[in-house]
Amino acid sequence: MTYADTLFKENIENILTNGVFSEQARPKYKDGKTANSKYITGNFATYDLEKGQFPITSLRPIPIKSAIKELLWIYQDQTSSLKVLKEKYGVNYWDEWEVGTTGTIGQRYGATVKKYDIITKLLAGLEKNPWNRRNIINLWQYEDFEATKGLLPCAFQTMFEVRRGESGALYLDATLIQRSNDMLVAHHINAMQYVALQLMIAKHFSWQVGKFFYFINNLHIYDNQFEQAQELLHRTPSKKEPRLILNVPDGTNFFDIKAEDFELVDYEPVRPQLKFDLAI
């Protein structure tokens, strides 16, 4: 069993056994019913990417390509336009969160990145002094929340740290902080997205990727997913340790990296895929 699979099963068992039920839940299922969940708080994990510990489960297929396209939409295109996401990347699942008939998800995610020029400032700060302790992406901007309606960011803060390894090479570590996470559907999608972002920044500066730290304040399983949770617990995972590779030369500009430059190797997920009714 891979490191990620071990943590995945432990988290599922912990939520089902020790979790508590949500109260006054905001999300709804498509039929209009309240999407309650069972959850735990303060979940933390460390993945040593240098040692091949990548945060992706083999217990079900994870659509990493569409997840990376979403990441590029946010941090390269820096827009919340659904038209860009659909026409450029062929990704449609954000349509459920369109704000009215604006064709956007509101002043959120990529629109926030653009408004505060976050990526340009982050890269400039790392270039000026890789050892500074202020390399932060923060999407939790109250001014933006007041400007328009829209889903509040789940994965809202990322911090980066540079350190020199024993070999003398520079390593980029990353910490992702998430206020809320759907354990069965989004957990490994979000984690791998931000590992991809970590890889992109590391390649931009010709650095190595080091460790990925993942903190989730509310880790939950929705009340219509308990059957799928049991199925995942009983599946036998792959013995291979998958790895996400970015196939571009060191020093490639952050904004020149494409979705097709990423390759997920040694990934043999268990099938069939499970179906989940999303909470909106």
Image: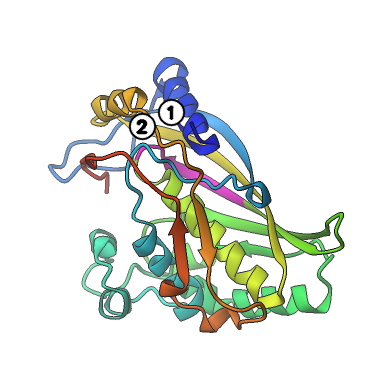
Element under disc 2? strand
Residue 234 x %, y %: 33, 22
Determine the residue positioned at 26% across, 72% down.
Answer: 90
Of pointers 1 and 2, the one earlier in the residue sequence: 1
Q: Is the magenta stretch mostly helix, strand or loop?
A: strand
Residue identifier under label 1: 39
* Observer-nearest of 52 and 46: 52
Determine the residue positioned at 27% across, 44% down.
Answer: 279
Q: Is residue 163 visible?
A: yes
Left or right: where 51 falls relative to 142:
right
- Rendering colour mode: rainbow
Determine the residue positioned at 70% across, 63% down.
Answer: 208
Q: In this view, does 22 lie above or below 52?
A: above
> Alpha-carbon neighbours of circle 2 within 10 Å: few (<14), some, or many (≥20)?
many
Residue 185 x %, y %: 34, 43
Q: Which amino acid does label 1 sit on?
A: Tyr
Residue identifier under label 2: 221
Please say if the residues under marks 1 and 2 sit with CB atoms less than 8 Å apart.
Answer: yes
Residue 193 x %, y %: 48, 58
**The stretch drawn in magenta includes residue 256:** no
Which of the 4 image quarters holds residue 68? bottom left
Left or right: where 196 falls relative to 97:
right
Left or right: where 190 falls relative to 26:
right
Left or right: where 263 falls relative to 231:
right
Q: How many marks?
A: 2
Q: Is residue 79 above or below residue 96?
A: below
What is the spatial separation of the Cα atoms under label 1 and label 2, in whole angstroms?
A: 6 Å
Q: What stretch is highlighted in magenta?
A: 176-184
Element under disc 1? strand
Q: Is residue 140 visible?
A: no
